[in-house]
Image (cartoon, rainbow, N blue to C red):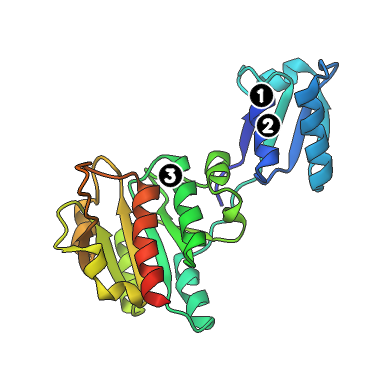
């Protein structure tokens, strides 16, 4: 599991509740100025169900949030339940489908992780793999960026991405890494039509050395407009579209 998280402030709490971010507790300051945003947040929490309301004095909320400007509202987000990487491929095979998985290497922005989850869901993928260290996790920001798709698209976490990719290879999956200097263009890779793991690196550094060496293929996305790179969410979407096209 990950760790619990606090969303603080009237607008952030309202937006998290509106966007379906999982929550277990909504703390409300005693004698709060009950403006429209507070009323909307309370109504959303009541409508969702399963969110406990707790009234607390301002000093207690100050202590919980380490002095952040909470404006009288604090939302507790429970730890995310990560899947095991093996489960993603196993679930696809059990359904008679070729696994389509995205692994992220060095992607540290939760919003990019959420965007990748959204793309995986849109193109019929079976999940996302992230490393435990030096990588974005499923925070409230990632949930929001996923636009609700995180509720149905599993995210798995691994201790060592290289070993996880090698395990996928032994299970019959092809590992395809995205790289600006890839040997082939993404549209030319027939392997995307079968069981595959697409590895996306960070926008600045790309794939790490060991991960790049583990890939069966390294492919590039042609960009005639001259941009040097794409962020992880956009890059993953391009390749997932090609994989979905081949499968259909």
Q: Classify mark 2: helix, strand or loop.
A: helix
Task: Say which quarter of the image contains residue 245.
Answer: bottom left
Q: Where, by quadrant of the figure, is residue 77 drawn? A: top right
Q: Looking at the image, is 110 positioned above or below residue 10?
A: below
Q: Position of residue 108 (x, y in %)?
A: 39, 41
SS for tag 1?
A: loop
Look at mark 3 in the image and give the residue it sits on.
112
In the image, 63 versus 36, the foreground residue is 36
- Asked whether the residues under the numbered discs 2 and 1 touch, taking CB atoms below 8 Å apart as contact, a structural biologist would say yes
User: Is there any visible trace of residue 209 in the rendered image?
Assistant: yes
Q: In the shown orientation, is residue 198 left or right of residue 157?
A: left
Kindly report the distance in space between the C-alpha atoms of the residues bearing marks 2 and 1: 6 Å
- Residue for point 45% across, 59% down: 128
Q: CA distance from mark 3 to mark 2?
A: 21 Å
**Residue that appears at 59% across and 50% down:** 80
Q: Earlier in the sequence, mark 3 or mark 1?
A: 1
Q: Secondary structure at mark 3?
A: helix
Q: Which mark is residue 100?
A: none
At x 31% / y 64%, what residue is drawn?
163
The residue pinned by badge 1 equals 9
């Amino acid at each position: 599991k990950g760790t619990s998280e606090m969303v603080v402030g009237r607008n952030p709490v309202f937006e998290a509740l509106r966007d379906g971010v999982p929550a277990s507790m909504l703390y409300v300051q005693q004698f709060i100025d009950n403006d429209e945003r507070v009323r909307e947040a309370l109504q959303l929490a009541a409508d969702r169900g399963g969110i406990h309301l707790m009234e607390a004095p301002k000093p207690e909320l100050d202590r919980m949030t380490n002095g952040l400007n909470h404006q009288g509202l604090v939302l507790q987000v429970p730890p995310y339940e990560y899947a095991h990487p093996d489960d993603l491929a196993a679930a696809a095979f059990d359904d008679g489908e070729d696994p389509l998985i995205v692994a992220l290497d060095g992607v540290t922005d939760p919003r990019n992780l959420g965007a990748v989850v959204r793309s995986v869901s849109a193109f019929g993928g079976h999940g996302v793999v992230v490393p435990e260290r030096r990588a974005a996790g499923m925070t409230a920001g990632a949930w929001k960026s996923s636009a609700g798709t995180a509720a149905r698209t599993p995210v798995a976490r691994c201790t060592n991405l290289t070993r996880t990719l090698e395990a996928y290879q032994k299970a019959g999956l092809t590992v395809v890494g995205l790289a600006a200097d890839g040997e082939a263009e993404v549209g030319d890779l027939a392997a995307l039509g079968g069981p595959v793991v697409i590895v996306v690196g960070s926008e600045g550094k790309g794939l790490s050395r060991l991960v790049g060496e583990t890939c069966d293929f390294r492919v590039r996305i042609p960009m005639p407009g001259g941009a040097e790179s794409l962020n992880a969410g956009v890059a993953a979407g391009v390749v997932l579209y090609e994989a979905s096209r081949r499968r259909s």
